[in-house]
Amino acid sequence: MERRKSLYAQALENRPVDPNYDLESFRARVLARVRQDHPDALQNPRKNEMYLRNAAALVDPEAAWSVVDSIVRDMLGYGPLQEFVYPDRPEQEGITEIIVYAPDRVRIEKNGSLSMTGARFMDEKHLLTTVQKIVLSCGRRISETEPIVDAYMPENGARVLANLPYGPRLGWMTIRQFPKRFSLEELTENGTITSEVVSFLKQAIRKKYSVVFSGAMNAGKTTLMNACLSLVPEEDDMLVYEDVPELQPEHRNTRFILSRPKRFGAGKSFLEEVSQEQLLRSRADRIVMGECRGKETYYVLQNMCLGTPAMTSVHADSAVDACLYRLPSLLVESEEGRALGYTQCLTRVMLAVDLIVHVAMLEGVKERRVVQVAEVLRKIAPGGLAPDPHVIFEWDSQSKKLLPVSEPRLFAEKRKVWT
């Protein structure tokens, strides 16, 4: 819906900007007037946007619309990024990522493609002030003692990764916005996954097999896993662990737990770290880990080995790469994994993981597709049992389809530890 403007503001829209205009002085006068006339407007600026625009225009009737707009956007908290975070025109909708490289360089991702925008910060100070406001809105702070922050916006769930400059280079920031939750039916209709694979996954998940979703950054792992949560039986007690809330299961019997880094609290006190490996000790019928990045992988797979089915995601080049290299490498990042050794970590992957679904962004067309589905079987290796990834669905580049390439053997060969 387009932003409504007052008639007075419309009259100022085409007024040229004076390059010598004292923007900081204007900003101070606008804030002083708002604090005097309507201080509550600053507590919830988005609901009072129209008042703020009219107040700024009345403080200086000669100010150009672009100057008024810049001041109000700063008061709203997002500065030049306001139109991308909260779009007010149809062409601004559907943006999935905002990347700030420098005060005069902002790019956005839409439909899988990056493009440069005309958004500009006044200078480095303006950029850093905006970064600090956004981080504060996430309930975090960014400073020299905590120069990198990974958080989420409570208002819309967008993920914020900000870096304060602690060296000779400028800081940067990315805001990753998540589209609406896609259902499996929608993903099937747009070609991301086939109905045959959905039927196979439905059978596997309902039989309590563990599934790992692999792929590169921004390939669609979380989107697909989010949709596949609908295959979990409603009666299951599900426990969801994440660093940043991205998953949106619709089950009533769902508990959510967020990890938390160690950081300053009130005064000089510390808020103790809450890590994912500490959290993976609760009883549940099914565990869902947003993403395995480090030593928490050991505890996720340990729960799988003990009979608790799980779903998680991991960065990898292929389903085979995730099974034989990426997951074992993540296991040895924990103290327990190092004590086991790499060979035993391979055995742990074989015992824990049942299916790996690999997602990729197709080059050229910029479309996300399931390109490989592999079941993790077992084989005898020199050091004992080892995982044997067996590909059952694979993307065919000639027909541009996901085709079955072998008969699944998972249900007949893999042992079960549940009733």
Image (cartoon, grey):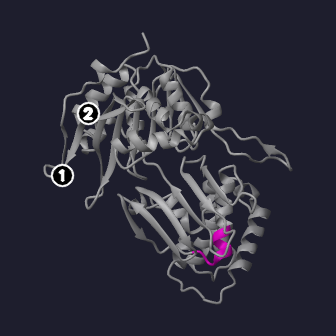
- Residue 368 x, y percent position in the rendering: 31, 50
Give the numbered dot on residue 197: 2
> Where 350 sits versus 364, above or below?
above
Tag 1 residue: 397
Give the left or right position of residue 191, taking residue 383 as reference: left
Q: Nearer the viewer, residue 381 or 155?
A: 381
Occupied quadrant, residue 321 = top left
Marks 1 and 2: in contact by CB < 8 Å?
no
Q: Amino acid at mark 2?
A: Val
Under circle 1, the secondary element is loop
Give the left or right position of residue 62, taking residue 118 as reference: right
Under circle 2, the secondary element is helix
Occupied quadrant, residue 31 = bottom right
* Residue stretch in magenta: 121-128
Give the Cα distance between marks 2 and 1.
18 Å
Give the left or right position of residue 390, taking residue 307 as reference: left
Q: Quadrant of the N terminus?
A: bottom left
- Residue 349 x, y percent position in the rendering: 44, 32
Residue 122 forms part of the magenta stretch? yes
Q: Residues within 10 Å of mark 1 (few under 14, many from 20)?
A: few
Give the numbered dot on residue 377: none
- Residue 377 x, y percent position in the rendering: 33, 28
Q: Residues within 10 Å of mark 2 (few under 14, many from 20)?
A: some
Count how many numbered circles sit on residues in the image: 2
Per the picture, the main secondary structure of the magenta-coloured stretch is: helix
Looking at the image, which residue is at 74% across and 63% down?
Answer: 144
Q: Quadrant of the C terminus?
A: top left
Q: Nearer the viewer, residue 312 or 248?
A: 312
Looking at the image, which residue is at 64% across and 67% down?
Answer: 74
* First of labels 2, 1 by sequence position: 2
Looking at the image, which residue is at 58% across and 47% down?
Answer: 155
